[in-house]
Image: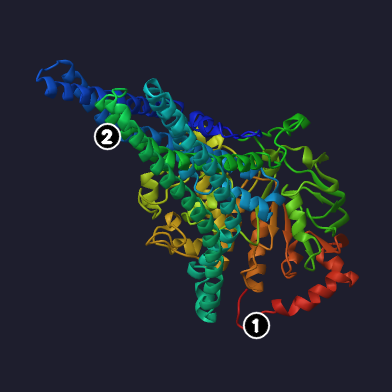
Amino acid sequence: MFVLKKRKYTWLDMYRIPFSCAPVSTVLVTIQKAITALVNIFQVIVVAEFLDGTIDAVAHKSYDSKLILWFVLMLLTVSWKRVSYNIGRLFTSHYVTMGNRQVLQEFTKKRTRLEYYLLEDPETEELTNRVVNKLERNLEELLQRFVNFFVVYIPRIVGVLLIIASHVWWLAIVVVVMAVPLILISLRGGQKIYRANEEAAVYERRHKYFFDVLTGRETTEERSLFGYSGPVNAQWYHQYDTARKINMKAETVFTVNMQGSSIVTSVLASAVSLIMVPLTASGALSVGLFISLSTAIYDLVKLMGWEMTRAVAQIARYREYMKDLTAFAALPERQQDSAESISGRGESGGGQGQEIPMLQTLEFRHVTFRYPGTEVNILKDFSMLLKEGVHYAVVGENGAGKSTLIKLLTGLYREYDGEILYNGREMRTFPQEEWFRLFSCVFQDFARYYLSVEENICLGGGDMEPDAVDAGESTATGQRPAEGAGMVKDSSAEAKEAGAMGNPPAETKGIGVPGNRAEGGLRARMQEVTGKIGLEPAISAMKFGYGTRLGKLDEDSVDLSGGQWQRLAMARALMNDAPVLLLDEPTAALDPISESALYEKFGEISKDRTTIFISHRLGSTKLSDHIFVLKDGCVREQGCHQELMAEGGIYAAMYETQQSWYSKEEGVEA
């Protein structure tokens, strides 16, 4: 099993990585290649003996039974060379399949563990793209190039040279002298090609982005309305052509060098063959051996003039790839282990599947933070105390630090001065998995998953099991048949003990209460959530109900409006059992009146949970129990809506400015 480790990767890992992914297939490919190399060497002797035997039989008109043996052996060598490729492809395909899954899984794990600031770093993104892109092709070439070079080409060359040296020693030296410059040229060429690809990667990333702008569905309306395809197409072509020229220049130089070297080597090989003519005439070489060696030398010319040199160039290229893999593996990660877990603090839970500890207090204590690579503090000696079960709102102007609070709470950034305490414990002492389970989030830039409605919602609870479909229930509820998106199985301990999905646990506390499931399992919980936030009518109108696929991937998929997608993201967050619910501008696509109406219901749904709501719109923040007003990275005001309005300060001025947004027009219901 391949495991990505922080160590120095070298050209030897071209074989180590395949072997760790699929040892049996890798060994079998190696054996197949080794047999092929031996067959090529043995063929020189077999052909020489067969030709000499045939010439002798014709000259003396006598038949030797050994001739049949050499003929059979010659047929076997030719047959093996024909079938060995397909045998090798079979084992290679298995290795590539296994390797692609294992290596990609390790790369994905690595990316999820990276410090968040690295994900926003262009250099890290380019490094990751070089390592991950074309992974399947890279995995195949890692094994093929290494085994071809060290198991096929080198033994084959050495074997033929030994045969030549056993008859004419100096001819072997001539062949070696021809090979050395080609290998050196190949090494330099492989390094140049990889570095050219590295330089071109920047432009490739840009032209792929512009291509998405020109062809993507999300830009269709503005692309048609503004008619910007021409200028953007020019940008795309410039980036694409620049990348093409960089790669083409390196490939052209390499190809010219290789072809030029091949021509020179072919001329030298012809000269060697001519030199062997008088040796054959003098009896130093037999006629059969002359013909066989001449053919072998021309094969070696082809091998060293193109195939082997190309393999050397690829090895040089992957040697550079291993440097990138070393750098990628060494990227700093979030802290995975902790001296003490949540359970070690006397709380129950902490591991996956265990009860999450309820929030008692959450406190920012003199926190100062700036983003990596910047000089400006976003939070400045920031302090804030939150308590269990209270609905909080955080408001302020752009740049006041509102969204930064969310990133610090969720552990996206951990390099801050001061303390953030959960039940009195510094957050940075929590293992990453436990930290993430403390919060459920709805971001303004939420993800839109082109899955079924129920899969979209239940992703928040981590219980999506599409294959666990109850056919009877699906039919009764208007679900898509078995080939569509499936039901979601309640994986809580209570439901499993009940023995059926529809049986509720003995005690439930309603939606969103940490560690509990709503009566009726996930289905009932999901329906109650969607009903409360106003999604149920839209879902009921869909052809397959909760089994309807969203987006535009399938013929019968349904797309949602911006507001519906946001409500869906909120439903997903409410399915999560985290003690704290974070809402960062989650209703930007809704009009102010609909937003206020939604949050009135949202208060009912999220009761018994601590919520932190960030918004520029203040019409809905008045529903919160406590409001923090941020300015210049500090808390300038705090209190309930009535208290802040009575103060007549920052909050009151902001609210009075926006108050007209929430005035209901005559005849319009909230």
Counting the numbered discs, the total is 2
Question: x, y (%) of residue 42?
Answer: 32, 24
Left or right of residue 199: residue 44: left
Q: Compared with residue 121, is residue 5 higher up or lower down, i.e. above or below?
A: above
Q: Nearer the viewer, residue 298 or 243?
A: 298
For the point 65% across and 46% down, the residue is 513
Q: Amino acid at mark 2?
A: Arg
Q: Nearer the viewer, residue 145 or 654?
A: 145
Q: Nearer the viewer, residue 54 or 613?
A: 54
Secondary structure, mark 1, is: loop
For the point 73% across and 61% down, the residue is 614
Question: x, y (%) of residue 301?
Answer: 39, 39
Number of residues whose C-alpha sits closer than 10 Å to that of mark 2, classed few (under 14), some (14–19) or many (20 or more): few
Residue 82 bears which disc, if any? 2
Question: x, y (%) of residue 234?
Answer: 54, 74
Q: Amino acid at mark 1?
A: Glu
